Image (cartoon, coloured by chain):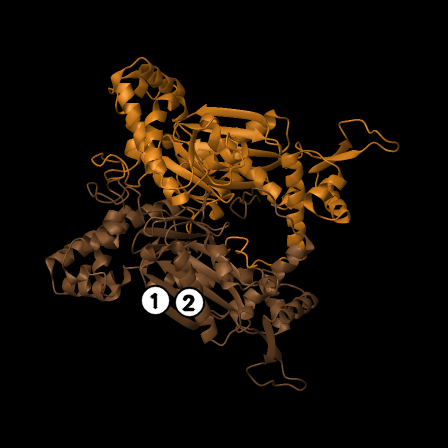
Chain colours: A orange, B brown
Amino acid sequence: MASPLAHPVHLRTAPARADQATVRRLNLSLLIGTLAGGGPRSRARLAEDTGLTKATVSSLVAELTELGLVTEGDAGEPHRGLGRPGRVLHLNADALRCVGVEVNIDFLAAVVLDLAGRVLARRRIGLSVVELGPARTMGRVAELVRELVDGLGADPTQVHSVVVSLPGLVEVSAGMLAFAPNLSWRDVDIAHTLSGRLGWPDVRVAVDNDANLGAIAEYAAGGEAGSPHLVYLAGEAGVGAGIIEAGQILRGASGFAGEVGHIPVGPAAAQCGCGRRGCWETGVGLAALLAAFPIDDEVRDPTVDLTARLEEVARRADRGDPRAETALADQGRWLGIGCALLANVLDPEVIVLGGHYPPLRRHLEGSMRAEMTARTLAGSCRVEFSRLGFDAASLGAAHAGIRALLDDPTQARPGAA
Amino acid sequence: MASPLAHPVHLRTAPARADQATVRRLNLSLLIGTLAGGGPRSRARLAEDTGLTKATVSSLVAELTELGLVTEGDAGEPHRGLGRPGRVLHLNADALRCVGVEVNIDFLAAVVLDLAGRVLARRRIGLSVVELGPARTMGRVAELVRELVDGLGADPTQVHSVVVSLPGLVEVSAGMLAFAPNLSWRDVDIAHTLSGRLGWPDVRVAVDNDANLGAIAEYAAGGEAGSPHLVYLAGEAGVGAGIIEAGQILRGASGFAGEVGHIPVGPAAAQCGCGRRGCWETGVGLAALLAAFPIDDEVRDPTVDLTARLEEVARRADRGDPRAETALADQGRWLGIGCALLANVLDPEVIVLGGHYPPLRRHLEGSMRAEMTARTLAGSCRVEFSRLGFDAASLGAAHAGIRALLDDPTQARPGAA
């Protein structure tokens, strides 16, 4: 009997060569990914779970052990038979540390993770990045990274990567920031500047956009972890989307995909900072929300902690303050309109709202969900609120380093950077 | 010196196992893809071009020859030295045929390709699919496929695949049409119905959405062939997008990505058939364009060939007919607004406009490009007009079969379906 093509058609630009080195790298990645994602297990179990032969598993485990990424220990439960107790393999989470840094308008945030994604250190410092400018800011970033790593008693050779999040258009493969409107930075070579400042020869330094890294944080450690079709909406200064499609960041041809802040689905008459009218940001941005309150209102005071201000706005709406109620219902409505659009174009499993949205959840949700339901054509996209708070980008940056290492465990070899 | 991560971070849901069978399949695909895309060459040259050893190439070529997909012949130019003339390997384009069928509101179109993508036969028949209903329509599809294959003197065992294009929401892996609003079809098992009608046990039958298949046609055989970040906009009855991102069709979580017809970036007051107002389709759809003319105008007569009607509209605008000029300038403007939105969200290299747009090009282009330029934030997305005419979907359907075979050449083994 004829049967449908088992899989959707896959297109390829250039077929990839599966030579022995590539195959070995893929299988090293498969084994360490299995230990990282599924927990400790014996060689025999690893062979069973991956379909590789026991001989191949033994050879690959020897290499991973030599790289320091895998260690061997007794099984948790006592061995019931005679002979040696069962030996299990673990991911050596302490082998290397991955650092994530977020550079934003008025703060730097940094986090250090072990290879299991546990937070070893975290720091946030307030400063005016715009006033400081790129050169001195990157100096402060290097200081911050150095302090955190020193504070852990770690050596630079124990650091795998430092990944920096930036609020703007990033050229990932060049390690460059192309343009960050809210910082007024243009064409800054972030990766090489920071490499030069740190002077840590084996440490990989990379850079990405805050929305992409927020998406990676959600994918790696958020409430929707592992969802292969996920959009993360970073609301705060600007509004940007990080799109994960089929388990990969959707970057587009120039690496600038996800620039949703200025798509024309906001209030038609609203003037946007970009010079156009009707941009989505004028409906769903933080500035748009706060502009509903008088200019001398404490919720607009930038010296007050943002979470505290957002909670105050939510409390006013709880009490029935009509200004707060209307502003939040409006923002929820614009959120729903734009999220439905993203659902129709991208058909994700879930859109996760980060940045300033989570503290306002109970007042955004009603009008947002009403628009989503009315406007989503097909699929079953959910909208959820992030639980990662304002640390999503730095957390995602550190996780991006872990992912790169798990994808290619030979990166753990000193001098492989 | 520290260096940036060489590649953008890749995330994966589950690591893929590279066992021997997988590796062999990938390398078979690599070799045949090299011959198909780059032309005939010797074993030695294949080894050089792919990086595989000569022994591996010889063994893989033996398998491809046994599958009938590769043949050996003399080199085109005479051998200059002594000894045997150089032998080169060719893709055996005649080994199998791939059939593509488009089912649309008032016609069926079918095309038969050889494995090099050459058109061996093509047929288009007008009929009212809505009146006929799914069962009888699929009967007509089977007849049409059978006639075309018979007409080539081909045997069903020489057919690799029949892929069917449908104007609606398609569940590719199930071979099902979920919903086609313009046909009023719901939950139709296209693949198994057609398989049953054909009764060709080794032929793969599959189904996909017309916009996705149009994108595949452009990627395989259009003016922008090979562009790995490509969006195809299928304008005609409805408006839908087929999105190719990093060389793969972007399907989303439910397979319903690219549903752009009802995103809210059309004229705010316009009532859409879906019940909402302001849908993009009301600005850029064919119906919206033709509605600018009186109801008894010949350009609205569905019994007249569509291309002839579109050319008449363009001619009127050439002559300065204000009704035609305004309608086309408006449609161009809405096209530019929506294409800029897609550029900001997806950052493709190119958006290709198919369906009813190409015959109207010279009158759409000005206002369309003005909006694109004003509204695209970053990247350098171009908008081009398709040269594939109204055959894009059936052509893409046939190419989808070729791609599936080149991805897994072992599909050529009888009984492998």
Task: Please name the residue shown 38% across and 26% down the image.
Answer: A356
In percent of width and height, residue A117 lies at 59, 31
Compared to residue B236, the image places residue A374 above or below, namely: above
Q: Dot 1 surroundings within 10 Å: few (below 14), some, or many (20 or more)?
A: few
Return the mark for residue B144: 2
Disc 2 element = helix
The amino acid type found where label 1 is placed reads Ile
Residue receiving disc 1: B125
Residue type beneath disc 2: Leu
Which sits earlier in the primary sequence, circle 1 or circle 2? 1
Circle 1: element type: strand
Give the total number of marks visible in the rendering: 2
Could you say which is closer to the camera, residue A320 or residue A256?
A: A320
Chain to which the residue tagged by mark 1 belongs: B
**Mark 2 surroundings within 10 Å by alpha-carbon count, few (fewer than 14), some (14 through 19), many (20 or more):** many
**Which residue is painted at 54% across and 36% down in the image?**
A226
CB atoms of marks 1 and 2 within 8 Å = yes
Residue A81 in view here: yes
On screen, residue A394 above or below B348:
above
Image quadrant in which the C terminus of chain B is located? bottom right
Residue B225 seen from this side: no
Judge from the rendering whether residue B8 lies leftward or rightward of residue B214; answer left or right. Answer: right
Q: Residue B359 at x, y = what percent? A: 25, 64
